[in-house]
């Protein structure tokens, strides 16, 4: 039988009877930065498939949003892990949204992060994004 696991939420900690595989989409509002950070986990993406996943996500946004424009993907780091990042913009319900999409393969799964602002990225928000990327600390023993 598995060992109990503590799972932290904003509201407190759950004691679960066994190891878990987190399937959630995490939506974080950053009110001072006037930004939103969304974290998605993709367990079915295998190493080497990151670029295909990135292209698939861009195709979905292009299909679903108006006035879509994306730059070429660039190499970056996420807490020391190699990652790919794309800057894009699109219109959602009449609002121009500026977004950074980052995909990173951890030891066990792919994580996709989107950092979005309606007001565009000013120098302060770009520093916030850089600090988020640099500040990631992979979970002990799991590579995240």
Image: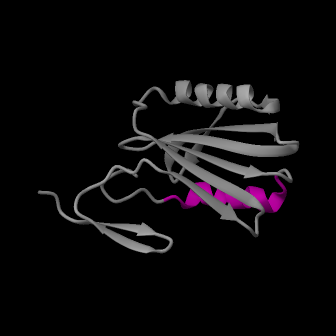
Magenta-drawn segment: 121-136
Q: Position of residue 50 (x, y in %)?
A: 50, 30
Residue 132 within the segment the image draws in magenta? yes
Of 39 and 50, nearer the camera is: 39
Instruction: Kindly report the secondary structure that dominates the magenta region of the rendered protein.
Output: helix
Of all residues, the one furthest to the front in this rendering is 93
Residue 61's x, y, as percent? 70, 32
Q: Is residue 135 magenta?
A: yes
Q: Is residue 12 left or right of residue 14?
A: right
Q: How is the image coloured?
A: one colour
Horizontal side, residue 35 vs residue 108: left or right? right
User: Who's the residue at 86% across and 53% down the image?
Assistant: 119
Residue 9: x and y in percent read 46, 68
In terms of image quadrants, where is residue 93?
A: top right
71 and 44: which one is in front? 44
Left or right of 49 in this view: 33: right
Looking at the picture, how far across and down is residue 75, in whole percent?
61, 37
Q: How many marks?
A: 0
Where is residue 53, by image quadrant?
top right
- Relative vertical location of residue 125 with respect to residue 10 in this rendering, above or below: above
Residue at 26 percent of width and 56 percent of height: 19
Q: Residue furthest bottom?
A: 12
Q: Nearer the viewer, residue 93 or 84?
A: 93
In the displayed structure, 118 sits above or below 55; it is: below
**Which quadrant, please, contains the N terminus?**
bottom left
At a point 61% along the width and 25% down the height, the residue shown is 55
């Amino acid at each position: 039988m598995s060992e109990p696991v503590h799972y932290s939420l904003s509201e407190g900690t759950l004691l679960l009877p066994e190891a878990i595989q987190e399937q959630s989409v995490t939506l974080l509002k950053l009110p001072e930065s006037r930004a939103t950070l969304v974290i998605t986990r993709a367990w079915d993406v295998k190493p080497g498939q990151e670029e295909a996943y990135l292209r698939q996500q861009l195709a979905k946004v292009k299909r679903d949003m108006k006035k879509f424009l994306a730059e070429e993907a660039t190499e970056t780091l996420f807490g020391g892990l190699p990652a790919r990042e794309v800057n894009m913009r699109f219109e959602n319900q009449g609002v121009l949204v500026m977004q950074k999409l980052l995909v990173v393969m951890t030891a066990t799964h792919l994580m996709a992060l989107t950092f979005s602002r309606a007001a565009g990225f000013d120098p302060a928000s770009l520093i916030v994004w850089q600090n988020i990327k640099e500040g990631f600390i992979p979970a002990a023993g799991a590579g995240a």
